[in-house]
Amino acid sequence: MTGVETLFQHIRQAGYKLTRPRQVVIEVLADGHAHMTAADIVSAVHQRAPDVGRASVYRTLDLLVRLGLVQISTLGSTTTTYMLVLAHHHHHLVCTRCRRTVEFDECQLAELEQALAEQFGFQVYGHLVEVYGVCQRCQGASP
């Protein structure tokens, strides 16, 4: 089963119908680059399915975020981006000077997730880590 099919199944298991707008939004996110703005997603959805309205895209994004299937990030800016959560966690190093973003998969937060879940009675689905600093290239450049 592909990651997209797993997401479709998760929506059904959560008690929601897999509508055409939901399916297209997930496909767009899966086929696009990791960080897409809502406007990028609306545009890509309209290219695939012109009959899917803007409001349907926004409602779908909201549902996918609530279900923990999509995470939002600002990557240190004021623009919100969306990304599928296929690995249940996502990590970035963000340069505050040039805005270069490095994604990494190494994760040592499993124990912290478990402790927080037990302490607060919380069911953890995933996490997003953004570490801000100055990249090596910008460290050598004049401010």
Image (spheres, rainbow, N blue to C red):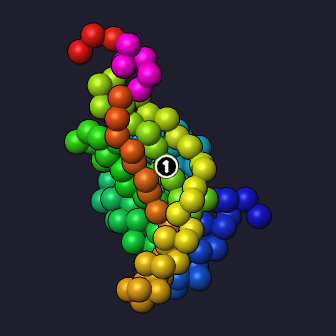
Q: Is residue 38 above or below residue 61?
A: above
- Type of the residue with mark 1: His
Q: Is residue 1 left or right of residue 100?
A: right
The residue carrying pointer 1 sits among few (fewer than 14), some (14 to 19) or many (20 or more) residues within 10 Å by Cα, namely: some
The residue at 23%/15% (across/down) is 143
Element carrying mark 1: strand
The residue at 31%/46% (across/down) is 74
Magenta stretch secondary structure, dominant: helix
**Does the segment drawn in magenta span residue 137?**
yes
The residue at 39%/72% (across/down) is 66
Q: Nearer the viewer, residue 97 or 31?
A: 97
Q: Quadrant of the N terminus?
A: bottom right
Furthest residue in direction top, as rendered: 142
Counting from the top left corner in percent of width and height, residue 39 is at 33, 43
Q: Nearer the viewer, residue 80 or 98?
A: 98
Can see residue 57?
no
Furthest residue in direction bottom, as rendered: 121
Furthest residue in direction right, as rendered: 1
Can see residue 80?
yes
Q: Is residue 15 left or right of residue 9?
A: left
The residue at 51%/53% (across/down) is 90
Residue at which label 1 appears: 91
Q: Is residue 73 left or right of residue 89?
A: left
Q: Is residue 1 above or below residue 97?
A: below
Total numbered labels: 1
Counting from the top left corner in percent of width and height, residue 68 is at 47, 69
Counting from the top left corner in percent of width and height, residue 134 is at 35, 29
Region in magenta = 135-140
Q: Nearer the viewer, residue 92 or 22?
A: 92
